[in-house]
Image: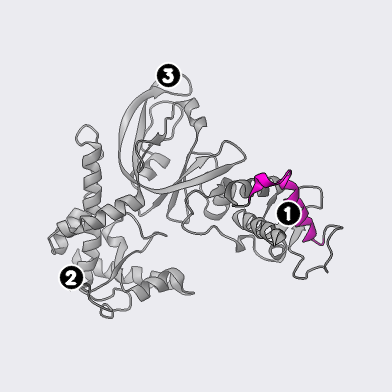
Amino acid sequence: MERIEWLQAIFKAFKELGGKGTLEDVYSMIEYNSSLPLDKYTDWKAQIRKTIYLHSSDCEVFKGRPNDKSDIFYSLEGKGTGGWGIRDQQSKHNNTFSLEYPFIEGQVYKRSYIHDLYGGNRQRGIAASKDKPMIFIFSGKEGKTYGYEDGWQDENTFFYTGEGQIGNQEFKEGNKALKDHIENSKDIYLLESLGGKGLYRFVSQLTCIGYHFAQGIDKLNNSRTMIIFEFEKTNKVSQDSENIEKEIESTNLEELRKLAKNAANNSSTMTTLQERKTTIRKRGAAIKKYALVRAEGICEACEQFAPFYTTKDEPFLEVHHLTRLSDGGLDHPEHVAAICPNCHKRVHHSKDGKEYNDQLIKKIKEKELAYN
């Protein structure tokens, strides 16, 4: 039973690494992500090596037959080089394994693997994917070298210094992507450095609620203006938006649309952080209500009546984000749809989910054109 637990932990580590990696990578993944009692062993790394060797026909201690059920791992460049992979991956595409989505809070990921899957600049603190609606922000203590002071203000609010090591920071490239992420329907993911080996712990999905400016010193020791982005945990914004949805009495589409498109005033000289939080929550509530009112009780995907009525005698539909990978947080009113639970499951879990979602995008686009 003990050996099976080691085997499961190693297999999981390789999955998190994309199907292959070095022994050091596997050690790190198991150390940070596994629940195995490592301190119980004098040399737990030896247990990992032994388990791999016992399940690889590339090793002398292997007792099975090549390519049978016990022949799980293979050496990338020959035993002794430290590189291993899951044998199934030898004849398959390297992307067979992918990160579970959304990321698991507290889980450790190899930064290179994240970029292998989703793209984005591998060196910058702000990395936007070209192919997916995702923006990754990487934070770590090493940023203090350039005057970056990222950190939590409370359990839900996180301040993050914009990019740019020399001169005043401007709203371009990564900084612009963060500021406009709601309008562009992009999700933001915060990962914190563990201090080496390219390992980062996923902290939370965030929503930008505003920004302010601060004075600091750049890489050349010159005074400059820095952008401090103000983020809040997306699940907190979503939860609070649902709680105040009942405060929005209007059922007029145009009024709801205006409220939904009204982004928070990001100028710290005109509003307080708390005022920006309130505006963001109202916007989130308005977006949800806008989609439900527009649907008129009919699923915008299958065009059937809502499956049942709620205790408030309202047709039950769920709000789906069309162009993002998650259904939490804020969005643009043209990028949401009110659909029945069955269609919602189909979009996210069926074999034809992407095609079904593409059809829904076209339907919503036609609906919105009729309102303009």
In this rendering, which labeled residue sits more in front, label 2 or label 3? 2
**The residue under label 3 is which amino acid type?**
Asn
Residue furthest to the front in view is 40
Q: Circle 3 sits in a helix, a strand or a loop, which is it?
A: loop
Q: Position of residue 73 (x, y in %)?
A: 74, 60
Q: Is residue 249 above or below residue 23?
A: below
Cβ–Cβ under 8 Å for marks 2 and 3 = no
In this rendering, which labeled residue sits more in front, label 3 or label 1? 1
Q: Is residue 284 above or below residue 201?
A: below
Colour scheme in use = one colour
Q: Is residue 329 above or below residue 269?
A: below
- Say which mark, if any, is on residue 84: 1
Say if residue 245 shows up in the picture.
yes
Q: Residue at x 46, y 29 (%)?
A: 165
Say if residue 161 shows up in the picture.
no
- Which residue was labeled with disc 3? 222
- Say which mark, if any, is on residue 276: none
In the picture, residue 362 is in which quadrant?
A: bottom left
- Which residue was labeled with disc 2? 312
Residue furthest to the bottom in view is 304
Q: Position of residue 221 (x, y in %)?
A: 46, 18
Magenta residues, start to end: 37-57
**The residue under label 1 is which amino acid type?**
Trp
Residue in front for this viewpoint, 198 or 203: 203
Q: Circle 2 sits in a helix, a strand or a loop, which is it?
A: loop
Real-space Cα separation, disc 3 to disc 1, in angstroms? 47 Å
